[in-house]
Amino acid sequence: MIPSEKMVFRPSAYAIIVHDGKILLVRSKSSGKYWFPGGGINLEERLETGLKREVKEETGIEVEIEKFLDFRELFFYYEPKDEAYHCFAFYYLCKPKTLDLVKDEDVDDGEAEKPRWIDIKTLSKDNMQAGAEGILDFLLK
């Protein structure tokens, strides 16, 4: 059990960006596993605005949001900050407006690193961050 003072409520949005049979993913610094670009939405920031900001910070590209895909309620513990999160995660299918990724050293995020276009067929639940199973199943259909 985690004390309530270590629990953080975090609405967030994540982009599912597919181009030419590849999906854009970032690596989690703490786990080394893949995850979708996106993250926490700031107070008074619209989901769509926050999603575009997060994608730009983590990958360097701009996206067009095509449609809402899924919603997940996640609970997770983040060791580097010694905090637990209650996350409302909104997933959107996005189309890339630009394709050139930011250099690894220029990623502007505390947890995401190494944005890469990954062949969807090479993904498995083993190399994805926990919580991605439903989205991964959708992509592999």
Image (spheres, rainbow, N blue to C red):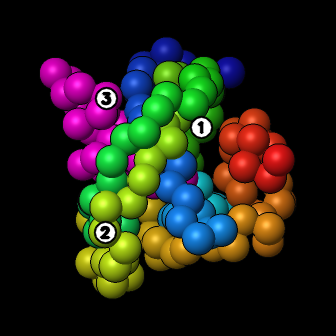
Whichever of labels 2 and 1 marks the residue nearer the N terminus, that label is: 1
- Can you give x and y, in whole percent of width and height, for residue 25 in the image? 55, 63
User: Along the line of sight, which residue is nearer the eye, 133 or 40?
Assistant: 133
User: Along the line of sight, which residue is nearer the eye, 44 or 111?
Assistant: 44
Mark linked to residue 47: 3
Three-letter amino acid code at the position of disc 1: Tyr
Residue at 59% across, 27% down? 70
Relative to 55, is 69 above or below?
above
- Can you give x and y, in whole percent of width and height, for residue 108 in the image? 27, 65
**Foreground tag (2 vs 1):** 2
Three-letter amino acid code at the position of disc 2: Thr
Q: What crowding class fits label 1: few (fewer than 14 Cα within 10 Å), some (14-19), or many (20 or more)?
A: some
Whichever of labels 3 and 2 marks the residue nearer the N terminus, that label is: 3
**Residue 99 picture quarter:** bottom left
Mark 3 to mark 2 CA distance (whole Å): 20 Å
Three-letter amino acid code at the position of disc 3: Leu
Can residue 83 be seen here? no
Residue at 69% across, 41% down? 135
Q: Is residue 44 magenta?
A: yes
Relative to 58, is 52 above or below?
above
> Helix, strand, or loop for circle 3?
helix
Magenta range is 36-55
Whichever of labels 3 and 1 marks the residue nearer the N terminus, that label is: 3
- Can you give x and y, in whole percent of width and height, for residue 12 in the image? 41, 32
Q: Which residue is mark 2?
A: 98
Mark 3 to mark 1 CA distance (whole Å): 23 Å
- Can you give x and y, in whole percent of width and height, for residue 113 in the image? 45, 70
Mark 2 to mark 1 CA distance (whole Å): 34 Å
Can residue 100 be seen here? yes
